Amino acid sequence: MAAHIRRRLRKGATTTAVAAAAVAALAASQAPAATLTEGTAGGDPKAAGEDTASAGDDGAATGNSPYYTDLPPLVTPDKPGSSSNLPATGSAEAGIPASILAAYKQAERTVAATDPNCRLPWQLLAAIGKVESGQARGGRVDADGTTTSPILGPALNGQGFALIKDTDGGAYDSDAVHDRAVGPMQFIPSTWASWGQDANSDGRKDPNNIFDAALAAGRYLCANDRDLALAADLDKAVLSYNRSTEYLRTVRSWFSYYQRGTHEIPDGTGTLPTSPSTPSPSPRPGTSTGPSGTPSPKPSPHKPGGKPSPGPSKPGGDGSTSPKPKPPTPKPTPPSETFGSLENAGTGPLRATAGQTFDERVSVRARNALGAPLAKVPVTFTVTGSTGTLFTGGRKTVTVTTGADGTATAPALQAGEEAGKFTVTAVAGTGRPRTLTYAATVTARQPDAIARSDEKALVAAPGEKFADAVTVKATYKDAAAAGVAVTATMVKDPLGLIDNDEGPYFKDADGKPVRTLTTLTTDADGVLRLPEIFADDTEGTYLLRLTTEGGASVVIELTIQAPEETAPEETAPEETAPEEPASEETAPGKTATPEA
């Protein structure tokens, strides 16, 4: 890199003094704003399911792949400008292709809306895009912002670069053995799997699309709650992209250059650097190189005459020498049979409701030292956490052997009754085992229905309490939903939009009236029995609304009504039987005459 910069500075220079002056100008006008420290690391999170034993990329978005090292011109743009006042014209180097510039600015707006504390400047994205791909090869993109031809870095095979075995089956980089940096922002597939975005709303997360890639880069740079307005956080962000202080200096130079002004140019007309910073592969240990870079030959074990030198010999009985027997040389294990890496085989998000079976199953793929799928590798899967989740069959640990395609899939997970997070760990290999860890979540049951257990009318006299308790049951797909949180609120309307401040009420721990309870939970049978409900002195019909976390609800009527007064019964006068008229015999004034 240093030699490359010196060559640029020597162009047109006739003396050493001119070159020195150029270097001084570069240092004065384009030096990074913060002191650089060799080996600074941002400590960024890695993709879920990454092989922790072979993280050769050290968490860098690009896998520390080669990048373009052309520095900006020593002359600043013709017209100073900013994101709100860009010059219409300027030097060719200051021009950014229209689609590329639009993608950077859109990413800045999107991140500002979702993570305003990051304060991401689009000029930083432009600087990285310039260094990584020359602004998508001078803006050679189609109408949707997708590069007209793939932009791929070299195979990260450990030969002068990081060693990163294939993680995407060649889906993004067309390489099923090793990973390559992909697209205008040069993401390696494993990082894209975690940070990829769909910024142009076409239903795809495409690293070859500048809008998707720019937003992914912006979110990646903002990770770990960084504030990019702070020089230290900005340096950490850039180093997390490619862990090289020379890379940081180059990006910083372009960032400063674009901050001083830039302008829009048509797609496909941008300038390209002359060559990428492709380092030469390091020589293998045990070899030395001559001036030409080729390994120096080892000294011959023979003398110049070609005859072997006589070695020590042991006299035999016949005067001959008996060679010393050599121990048997162990047969090396072929690379095709050597366990190389363990990777995620496409496991999706692990989420399930308490008591339900997870739709997704944990799957891993083993590869040999050459990067090809490796069969017959035992993989041990273990569930760790306090949610009560187990594999089918009630086991916390299971061992599965990889098949011919190198994959091993764990049994289905059965969610426990406790909501919360847990992990599933996959371990394979001996001596230097590879480990993958997957995060999983159990959510509380969210019933689709809640209803009263009976239909009895609920009535209370003013100042009294309701004699009958309110009992409800929550269900999910007609099965009892246990552990469901329920909120009870006295309301004025059936939809429960207006709370009521009169009528029925509950009592808190101090005996004071409350009309909302939020600490209610259904029991193991999905049943909830509400606390006692009291009536104030205001007669009328009132509403009680019960709502679950899942959105199910029921409205119950409560009536405060004074008991009907019963009128006293009137006692009817006793009837006196009318006196029978006296017979002639007994008529008054007459004397009965006895019969003769």
Image (spheres, rainbow, N blue to C red):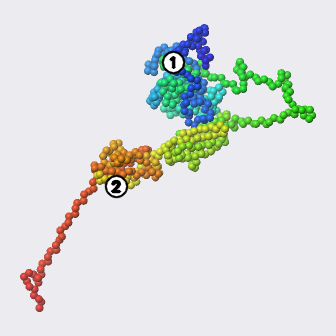
User: Whole-percent x and y of residue 50?
Assistant: 58, 35
User: Whole-percent x and y of residue 391?
Assistant: 57, 46
In this rendering, which labeled residue sits more in front, label 2 or label 1? 2
Q: Which residue is mark 2?
A: 467
Q: Amino acid at mark 2?
A: Ala
Residue most extreme to the right: 318
User: Whole-percent x and y of residue 448?
Assistant: 44, 47
Please state if 224 lies on the left or on the right of 459 as rendered: right
Tell me the quadrant of the picture where the N terminus can be found.
top right
Tell me the quadrant of the picture where the C terminus can be found.
bottom left
Please state if 519 lies on the left or on the right of 440 as rendered: left
Is any part of residue 48 visible from this angle?
A: yes
Q: Judge the density around disc 2: few (<14), some (14-19), many (≥20) Cα neighbours within 10 Å.
A: few
Is any part of residue 151 visible from this angle?
A: no
Q: Which residue is mark 1?
A: 257
- The structure residue drawn at horizontal position 33% and vertical position 53%, both measured from the top left corner, is 466
Q: Amino acid at mark 1?
A: Tyr
Q: Secondary structure at mark 1?
A: helix
- The structure residue drawn at horizontal position 50% and vertical position 32%, both measured from the top left corner, is 198
Please tell me in which quadrant of the rendered image residue 593 appears.
bottom left
Tag of residue 294: none
User: Whole-percent x and y of residue 22?
Assistant: 56, 12
Q: Nearer the viewer, residue 254 or 133?
A: 254
Q: Nearer the viewer, residue 504 or 544?
A: 504
- The structure residue drawn at horizontal position 29% and vertical position 52%, both measured from the top left corner, is 462
Please tell me in which quadrant of the rendered image residue 320 appears.
top right
Disc 2 to disc 1, how far (Cα)? 79 Å
- The structure residue drawn at horizontal position 65% and vertical position 26%, both measured from the top left corner, is 160
Q: Secondary structure at mark 2?
A: loop
